[in-house]
Image: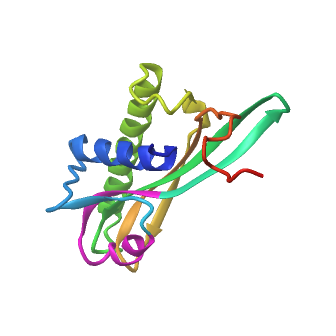
Amino acid sequence: MQNNIFRFVNYLSSLAVHHTEIRHTYNKEKHFVGLETDEQGTGLQDNLYFPALFLDEYSSEFTGVPDNFKKINRITLMILDRVPDPRDYEQILQAWNKCESIADDFVARIYSDSRNRRIPFIKEFSPVSVSYSLVENYKLGHYGIVVTFSFNTGFCEKVRPGAFDDI
């Protein structure tokens, strides 16, 4: 059985493959980096193409009251483009605009897919949980958007069969 983290990484990877500006491919042009820490460190310079989508963080917490609680997942994505000349402010603005448009596409698609139950592991997602921030690393020439949001995956209170030896 796949856990929600694995399913969400696969879902984002699929969106990156099908997005017309990102066009991630697994073997030729890598435009998506999941939670693989080695890739996040080395992939920026070695084999990554732009624009690129990063799943930067996936965390969870429980909210609510006893007998009525839910599991909330918090996500941080980064969408980056490359501008080689840090003094080319027009290109930098264009990169930020492109990354914001891509972020809008992803938010709209996640919202649509969650409402239509195409991603059944996401129980509740609302665009009002989304925030954007500009990001830049002028030394590497990377400019883009950090996207944060949360969604509810639900939580089953029953212990998985076989999860514990008999006590």
Question: Closest to the observer: 135 or 126?
Answer: 126
Position in image of residue 23 (x %, y %)? 20, 49
Residue appearing at x 29%, y 43% in the figure: 14
Indicate how the structure is coloured in the image. Answer: rainbow
Q: Quadrant of residue 11?
A: top left
Number of residue marks: 0
Q: Going by the picture, which residue comes out furthest to the front?
A: 166
State the extent of the magenta-drawn residues as a range: 37-55
When the figure is inspected, residue 83 is found, relative to residue 8, above or below; the finding is below
Query: On the rendered structure, is 41 left or right of 76?
Result: left
Where, quadrant-wise, is the N terminus in this rendering? top left
Position in image of residue 126 (x %, y %)? 57, 29
Q: Is residue 54 magenta?
A: yes
Question: Closest to the observer: 129 or 74?
Answer: 74
Question: Closest to the observer: 143 or 117?
Answer: 117
Q: Going by the picture, which residue comes out furthest to the top?
A: 116
Residue appearing at x 45%, y 67% in the figure: 136
Q: Quadrant of residue 128?
A: top right
Residue appearing at x 23%, y 72% in the figure: 47
When the figure is inspected, residue 132 is found, relative to residue 49, above or below; the finding is above
Position in image of residue 10 (x %, y %)? 36, 47
Query: On the rendered structure, is 20 left or right of 2?
Result: left
